[in-house]
Amino acid sequence: MSGPERYAQLRATAKIRERPLFSHPRSFGELELQARWFAGDFGNAFTGTQGEAVEVVQFGTWNREAGPDFSDAAVRIEGGEIVRGSIEFDLTDQSWEAHGHATNPAFDDTVLHVFVEAGGRDFFTRTTRHRQVPQVRVDPATLPAAFSLNLPLARPGRCHAPLRGQPEEKICSILEAAAQFRLQRKAQRLQRLSELHGKDEALYQELAAALGYKQNKLAFTLLAQRMPGKLLRSRPNEIEAVLFGLAGFLAAPDLATFARGTRQYLRVLWDQWWPRRAELERLIVPPRTWRLSGTRPLNHPQRRLAALAGIVTNWPGLTRSLGKDDLGPVRKFFRDLAHPFWNFHYTLTSGPTAAEMALVGETRITEILANVILPWRQWEERAVWPDFARLPARLTNRRIETGAARLFGDDPRRPRFLRTVAQQQGLLQIYEDFCLQDESDCAQCPFPEQMQKWS
């Protein structure tokens, strides 16, 4: 039995209880839920409100005009013929009436109405022609890990004492197996996205999310979902302007207030964006979606957006580098990304820096390799584990530190278990599978006993 299979077996022993140890009910916004729906996080097979089997064959595209949220979708009801049309996603079932969809002809081609909360009475979604639209209710509580988690640090768990007494090789073996399991899960996600949207779009969406970091992952995901890479590449001279415009960063500027270099750069973007603004206005990401404070200047989303534009512009070079056996060409691709403005600016309004900055730094390249490129190669059934195991850990975060506190406490060997990306990923998988699924404050968690049986 392989390491990932053994870890999956260990994981299966965990009893999933009604409430996690750290119970922080989340309030999901409609945009995030729509993005999670489009990414397939709710799945694609459902039971409708009338008990019928509903399969989403194609999730479509973000609608640019007035009407439902997603156009060009395809669904199958009760195993019948595929029906094509639009999908509307609302927070409540009665939003259909409250928002006037029932009397709006733009919603007449809707083939599925998705909602989160049901009202106190039965509600039937109908079009202006009195056609009943199938309904599906989704539950955010069933979602996999959220776009971002902010969990408190914790005291050492019950597994701390037995782990402290285990040989270092055994602990590393468990972390490695959990990391391989997690890598497989990431590869499966890419496979699912590819089946829904195509290989190039899946890669583009995941790269965008990786550039978004924790604070702006949702915003970057929305951008990539609403403006497919294929459409961007069809008008290569406008890629940067369209992305900045859809991000909402090109509101009508008073160019006279900017320094000369910035003024010239913004003028080019604005002149390219203005003719397409009316066409694309409905797809602009709302300002409240962005998290502009609390990020390091080098990680400002405007710089990351410039990096995404560079990736899309040089897409053939990226795909060529992915075809190579080693990671050197991929690393070189990201290191070579450059921009005459963004190599010397943190934001659109900041002054120039004295020293040149990399558009995508080594830390972010490592994160992209771990979370996108190597899972991509894993999905293609290429040998990736040796490369993955060698990636050095360049970052830590609150979840990693929380998991380390639970599992290792003050064990002096603790830093040695967090030296590589693989070890960190394995720790996160264990933390999510056991610590966050246990409401007994460790008393009934099966991990300590199962871990001791690991050989």
Image (spheres, grey):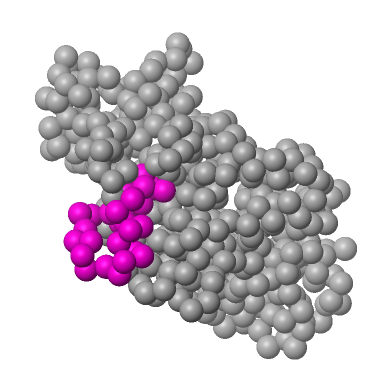
Q: Is residue 310 visible?
A: yes
> Residue at the spot x=72%, y=59% of the render?
179
Q: Is residue 253 magenta?
A: yes
Q: Position of residue 151 (x, y in %)?
A: 47, 72
Residue at (16%, 14%) from the top-left corner? 129
Residue at left 21%, top 41%?
119
Residue 228 picture location, percent across and down: 45, 37
Task: Give the image quarter of residue 127.
Answer: top left
In the shown orientation, is residue 328 left or right of residue 12? right
Q: Could you tell me which quadrant the C terminus lies in?
A: bottom right
**Residue 103 percent across, percent down from the top left:** 11, 25
Query: In the rendered view, would you say 339 is above or below 315?
Result: below
**Res. 173 image quadrant:** bottom right
Magenta: predominant secondary structure element?
helix
Q: Is residue 161 left or right of residue 355?
A: right
Span shown in magenta = 240-269
